[in-house]
Image: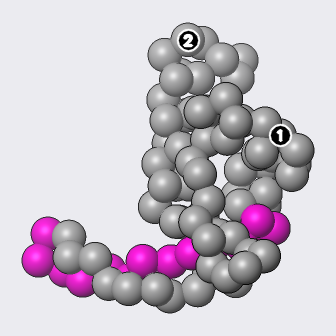
Amino acid sequence: MPVRVNEKETSNQKLPLKILRRRAVQERTGLGRSSIYSKISQGEFPKPIALGDRSVGWIEEEITSWIEQRIQSSRMHGGGK
């Protein structure tokens, strides 16, 4: 479940920033744990932020943007036929 962190002002509206835990990121992207960390190490996926000594999360907007980029790239290159 997303965790509210802060609010971001966008177009005169305040939208809450949300942090997604790994399981939610996996569900949204369809990627497995090792694929996520492999893509991070290759610079192809958003890096997580530290939430505590042993926990991390991802900014929801960054994950949404990554998904949108994959869709756009797929459409431009004829993927997903």
Residue drawn at x 42%, y 77% is 17
Separation (CA) of disc 2 from disc 1? 22 Å
Is 80 displayed left or right of 73 in the figure? right
Residue 12 falls within the magenta-colored stretch: yes
Q: Secondary structure at mark 2?
A: loop
Residue type at mark 1: give it. Ser
49 lies above or below 40 = below
Residue type at mark 2: give it. His
Residue 55 appears at what percent x and percent y?
Answer: 74, 75
Residue 78 appears at what percent x and percent y?
Answer: 60, 12
Q: Nearer the viewer, residue 51 or 77?
A: 51
Q: Which region is colored magenta?
A: 11-24
Residue that label 1 marks: 35
Residue 10 appears at what percent x and percent y?
Answer: 20, 70
Comes first in the chain, label 2 or label 1: 1
Residue drawn at x 71%, y 50% is 29
How many labels sit on residues? 2
Which mark identifies residue 77?
Answer: 2
Are the two marked residues, 2 and 1, in contact with CB atoms closer than 8 angstroms? no
